[in-house]
Image (tube, rainbow, N blue to C red):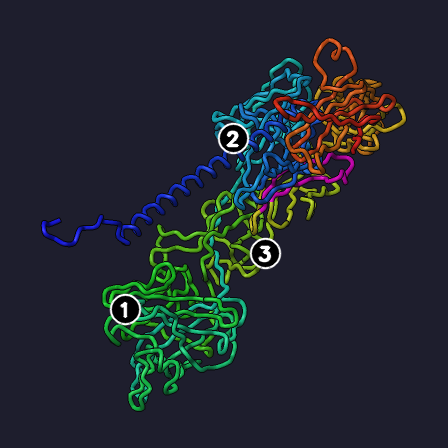
Amino acid sequence: MMIGDPTPRRPRGVSLVELIIAMTLLSIGAVALMGTFQVIGRSIQTAKERSLATNLCQEQLQILKQKNYYRVLITTAPAYDARFTPAEPYDNSFFLPETIEEGGMRFTRYTFVEIAQEVSGNVTTLAPTSADTGMKLVTVTTLWQRRGETKKLQMRSVMSNPDAVMTNSILRGKVTNSVGAVAIPNANITLAENTGFTDTTNATGDYIVNLYPGNYNLMVTAPGFFDVLVPAVVPANAAVTVNVALNPMANRDLQGWVWLNDNLVISQIMGSTATALPSGMTAEYVEIFNPTTYTWTVAGDIRLTFQPLAWLGPQRDIVIDFTGSTVTLPSGGYYLFANTGPVTINGVSVMPDAVWDATVGGANDLNFPYFDTTPGAENYNAIPINTDGAQQGAGVIKLYQVSTGKLLDKVGWKGGGAGFWPPDYENNPIDQMVGLSDNEQYTRFSSTAGVSTTVGRAYDMGWNFYDFWDTAQAGGVRFAPHNRLSPLEPIVSGEVPIGGSVSCNDGLSTPADIDWDFFNNGVSNAWAGRYYLTNVATGTWSLYAAFNNAFQQIDNVVVPVGAGVLPMPNAATAPPWPAANTPHLFLTSSTTDGWVLGTVTKTNGTGISPAITVTNGMTSALASTVWPYRFFLKTSPGTYNLTANPGNLNSSYVSVSSPAVTVTVGQVTSGVDFVLPQGGGLFGFVTRDGVNPLPGIAITATNSSGLVEGTVVSAPDGKFRMANIATNTYTVETQLSSGETASPASFSTVVPVGAPVFVGTFTVSGASGFISGSVSLGGAPLRTGVVVVASTATIVTPPTINAATLLGAGYFLGSSYENGSYLLEVRGSTSTTYKVYAYYPTYSAGVWTNTVRSSTSVSVLPGFTKSG
């Protein structure tokens, strides 16, 4: 403060601007801190979810491993959760999906059990109808929801049978090409009598199979070779060498083009051409073509729009108003729009089918700046060219169907004096610098060979640059337009169905993609729509082409022995090619189905009569009884378990399944082959006392080689039935838990072809049953877990492990789940009943006390569950 200044200075405060800045910085910091806490919270929750899911998977694996090996039944008919790709299989019969509450969350737990085998050092799975290999692969999957998304965690474990008979013999050898004796890698070797005995050849063509002694038939297969069945006799404790030479299949490569025609297309555009009109106007026109197989109504249901360069004004589709004929447009026909008529090109005059509306003050007059209706100076120009005004000449013509609002086609071209790109086009516009010019014409190609004066202008690669002939870049050659009175023209091309596929039912080839090929010399260096199907076996087959739901089947495809690529379709196929020497096919049908191709044979490689049924549970097909013994199953897309001889319809042969066969729309899934041994069946009865049934007891049938071929569990009525085992001599016995005994211990029986045989009755003593119920407090389930004890003795506190408890009455302990339910496995007992106790610890004033509840006189029937 200056001396003598009468006004003292006040302490300086905070201005409003500074306060706002401070508050903003604090807000940013708070928001950032909140976001950090949110991320940390989500991370903790995610870790919690995965930890709980891991525990649930581990728990189920541990439960199953504690069971008798034979009570962990193979999943013979898995269901599939299609929310995952590939679909997730799970057991829906023996180990049902479980809904479990844990940590305040709800989880779903799937179990899937497969027969496993070690092949070439890797654990692989076999068809569920394969004989037991002494190894099972158990997959447990736990699912949960996180923010609307289904998450999963999966664990696998291998179960081994401690009592399995060890294989003590070896079958080995080499697989070679019969021509030149060259080794064949990746050939499959499978023993028809037991598909669990299998291997694949290594890089030098060698294989090795550990197996039981016996007489076998080796089924040897390899892509590109004919299958062969070779007999082999394998003695005990011996190594037998069987070398196999495969004959190569004759095959050819097929090539053709595939097209999809489901829309009208813009086939020609002319921006300005001098024509002998009374008014001296220049003519502009748009020609459209119908490459589809059906007719279209034009007037009233077709709309043309023009869109100029975006920076010249609002980017929008401007409708071109017209009046014209109401006739329909047939397949192979043209329709001509113009500003006036007639239109004359190359001395040919053509009258338009529709003309632009030229009403004074009408929509065209108002919307298009170069559309002039002044009497004596008429210029009905809706499509500007490069000389109409500054930076003109670029744009897009679009073709719509009014009734559906569908965009049928669009053609865009550069311009603006500097090659400016138009606002819309198909992948790449027609390449221009100045834009559409006077006397310049864009004409759509008729095929990959270019423009034809006698073939429909239908080629549509989806790239404007590659689809059109531009007179400005092609020596000024122009083509006369067509109208609805012009002759109908054949169609040999269309839209390229990129992403589609072509397959054959020969059983050797694999599906080929429909693609474009920029490395071949076709139209403008683009060879589009071609398929190239390799290694098609010689014979007479069918081709299947598909793109989404569009489809076409070509029959009578004859593939002779010879060299070189075979064009297909041709004049002899059904349907034939659209024109001579044009191996083109059109997706004119629709389908929502796919196909499965395979064979059904006996173990000696021959067919079975009467014909064997193959089904996926929805549709069925019969396998041919003559070579090559094929079946061809049409079905909707999805993942299926295919079964040959379902339900033993032919009782002389077993039923065999092939799991997880994936079917795709319009494609053939091949290589699903079945080998059916002759078979029969056996049945029997399990009882707890010689009279009353005992369910839940595992029964096995072991053949003369010591191999378990069948496993079942007795039903609630005590009966068991094996209706699908090969003919042989079997030892049938119960597979019991500790403390259980059976009388007799086993039966020996011969299973003949056809009708099942009765084995006998097993009486099992000491079998288990179950006690189930729930625990609650105040009417709500106790979620913290309650200790539950069942015993024939009377107890007050939880039992202490000592000599007295070890020598006294048995105790069966368990714990309730988070939803309050519990399940105890106990010895079946009706004469001496159980007492069930629940212990719930509480803490008060530094002291733990147990709240005890009990239930008495609980009798449990062996094999059954006492509820409540």
Question: Is residue 231 in view?
Answer: no
Q: Dot 3 surroundings within 10 Å: few (below 14), some, or many (20 or more)?
A: some
Does residue 46 appear left or right of residue 389 in this picture?
A: right
Q: Mark 2 points at which residue?
A: 186
- Relative image position of residue 331 (x, y in whole percent): 51, 70
Quarter assignment of residue 304: bottom left
- Relative image position of residue 148 (x, y in whole percent): 54, 46
Q: In front: mark 3 or mark 2?
A: 3
- Indicate the amino acid at tag 2: Asn
Question: Does 587 appear above or below 378?
Answer: above
Question: Does 87 appear above or below 726?
Answer: below
Assign a secondary structure to mark 2: loop
- Indicate the amino acid at tag 1: Gly
Q: Residue 591 carries which label?
A: 3
Q: In front: mark 1 or mark 3?
A: 1
Quarter assignment of residue 847: top right
Does residue 292 appear left or right of residue 846 in this picture?
A: left
Q: Tell me, yes or no, whether the highlighted magenta stretch contains residue 640.
A: yes
- Relative image position of residue 372 (x, y in whole percent): 31, 84
Query: Spatial distance from mark 3 to mark 2, Cα to Cα?
Result: 35 Å
Does residue 765 appear left or right of residue 370 in this picture?
A: right
Q: Residue furthest bottom?
A: 375
- Indicate the amino acid at tag 3: Thr
Query: Spatial distance from mark 1 to mark 2, Cα to Cα?
Result: 59 Å
